[in-house]
Image (cartoon, rainbow, N blue to C red):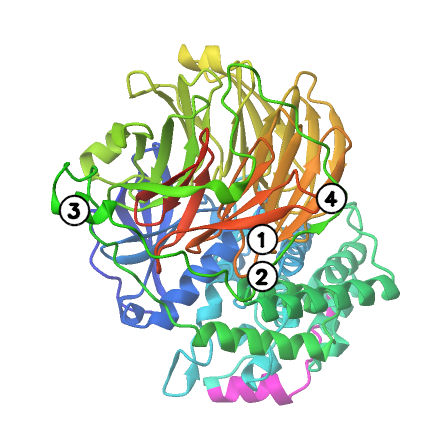
Amino acid sequence: MSETPRPLPRALGKYELRAVLGSGAMGTVYAAHDQSLDRTVALKLLSPALLGRADAIARFEREARAAARLTHPGIVTVYELGHGDEGPFIAMELLDGVDLAAAIAERRLQPGLRLRLMVDVCRALDFAHKRGVIHRDVKPANIRLTADGSVKLVDFGIARLRDSHLTQTGIVLGTPQYMSPEVLRGAAVDLRADMWAAGVVLHELLVGRCPFEADSVASLAYKIVHEPFVPPPLSALEAPREVADVIERALRKAPEQRFLDMAEMASALALAARLSAPVEPALAPADRAAQARQALDDARRKVAAGALDGALAAARRAQALDAGLSEAAALVGQIEELMDAAPTVRVAASPVPASPPPANSPAAARAAAPRPPAPPPLPDQPAHAAPVARPPAPRPPSADEPARPRQASALREAVVFGEAPGSHGALLASDGERLVLAGADGALRVWSLARRERLLTLRTEMHRRTSREAIAVALAISADGRWLASGHVDGAVRLWDLEGGAELACRLRHDASVPALAFSPDGATLASGGLDATLKLWDLEGARAGDARRELLRQPAPVTAIAWVGDELVTGHANRVLRVLDGGSRRLLATLRGPEGAIAHIAADPRAHWIAVASQDRDVTVFDLERRAPVARLGLPRRPASGLALADGLLAIANLEHGVPLWDLRAAPPSSTTAWAGAGESCVAVALPPRGLAAVLQDGRVRLFTA
């Protein structure tokens, strides 16, 4: 079922739309040119019929973020989730070749190649299932056969929008030929619905038709639910007899009688097809059950904490490990209902003065008036940290470096400054004076903390033309304060000269978002980490000369955070692991574990050789790199950290609340106080200038606290 494609817009932000690639019930896909990175992408826009539905938009965005976390050679890469005049959109990899539906129609594939491709499809689905994402619309049209002979799954997670809430005259939108019996009955859906669909695709790929066919949707649904599957004759299969057994098991009516997971189906198919591809060892039943129970317990903890996105991923992970675990299926349904019922709130930014009010003005008098006392701590704010071990005392500051106050409670609010648009990240230069804000419009703004005035606005050529650019999700400043690097959601890494405000012409890039950047202490190397699971070490001298020389280190999981501490490079990953590398030889020195969620931020205190690591499970863990051990674990009451700052034993944490927890790690156990912003304000980032604290607000302002 498809809709008439909407008229072709001329542009959407930095994307020039060139042609319609396809249209369906959920939206339209365009070929578009990314004018910033000079590449062609596929741009999917949500259907206009759904733009008035807050729940549809929320699901579109949520599932796009889930799909963007899947970095796998068999899954299309999602570059960006954005919003424009036409509504929300997803920018993704534009694939060459044809979809599997066209290949089936033309009978262009040899039997052996068909089986190998389906093994790859099964493995890609298993990768997604183990990370809590179910495709829900596996069919030949969503499997792309590329020019090099590989396959990629597309529309990952977006098909979840096609559920019982989005029906027309009682017919579920989607492709009924590939729907499992439990889907058509309206029962709970788990990974085994994808398994059924993969079995249907395998049958169609080998025989040329689907296993169940009818003249109407009602008759087709009846056959799928009630009539037994009739295996095709071996002469029609053009494959070994054992392949028919794989199809038969994948198409059993009862989900519990199918394969345990897609990895088992892939192994069975590879063996049946007599392929030389390696067979992945299966988990022992006891290990599988134990891991499923751990994931289920993790999901319940996250539900109790209100972290519904993480809870849903954990519950689906439990399903992927034990599809018969009824508690996991029930919990998935409960979480999805909670997420659907959660309101979507959009808050307009309040007007922000561009500079402090003039002396003797009424505004200045109001600002000088005594402020009401700060509100008490939140009821569920932790009173103390859970110490792992007492941290050693930090090294004393040098003689020419001003010491910060020993007691965090000595801070008091000094001034509020800033301007719209909003900010979502910040970084303090080593001079403790310049604060760089990453704007919601894609521009970077450099502020003087001493003068409370904007020094520079860093804008790309695209931003100058359109007032919009891909947002920066990572910032790094060289130790000498001369160079700024910004990592963006579209995979770009930009270098800026902070003395003149110019962008270097040399373009550095990854194939996915770049959430992690760090300069080496000597300023010779820039380390960038991407969601494409690569770490790139760029030669700064070459980059300044226009030569993008770099060393590529492939990583075991997407890189989400980086810190350079002395001669060691620390990388944080989506698989909850920290890797410590020798900065010179790039040799792996240690692997640190402890966080229970994907790592989001790393802040370093080089003089104490500490790092603070924030993860998506709302914990912040402090590690001593010299001892390779955690020294404190700090819990956050409501949300994961959105920013960290660590200096001289003080740790400040932003987590989108109006209070900024400030921990004194030198105490035993570590103690905390809270710097309060105004009611209703959200702190997205923090910085620790000498003798102070800067809390960066979501609306673009900065609240500065001093000793």
Q: Nearer the viewer, residue 217 or 588?
A: 588
Label 3 to label 4: alpha-carbon separation = 51 Å
The answer to if 214 sits in the magenta stretch is: no
Q: Relative to residue 254, is residue 519 depicted above or below?
A: above
Residue at 68 percent across and 49 percent down: it is: 633
- The disc placed on residue 310 is 2
Which of pointers 1 and 2 indicates the residue nearer the eye? 1
Which amino acid lies under the numbered mark 2 shown in the image of this protein?
Answer: Gly
- x and y, in percent, of residue 318 in the image: 70, 67
Rounded to the nearest angstrom, the CA distance separating label 2 from label 3 is 44 Å
> Residue 616 got which mark?
1
Residue 311 or residue 626, whichever sits in front: 626
Distance from the alpha carbon under mark 1 to that under mark 2? 8 Å
Seen in the picture, residue 638 relative to 595 is either above or below; the reply is: below
Residue underneath mark 4: 593
Q: Residue furthest left?
A: 361
SS label for mark 2: helix
Q: Are marks 2 and 3 in contact (CB under 8 Å)?
A: no
Earlier along the polypeptide chain: callout 3 or callout 4?
Answer: 3
Residue at 57% from the left image edge and 87% from the top image edge: 185
Magenta-colored span: 218-234
| Residue 310 visible in the displayed image | yes
Between marks 4 and 1, how big is the CA–CA gap?
14 Å
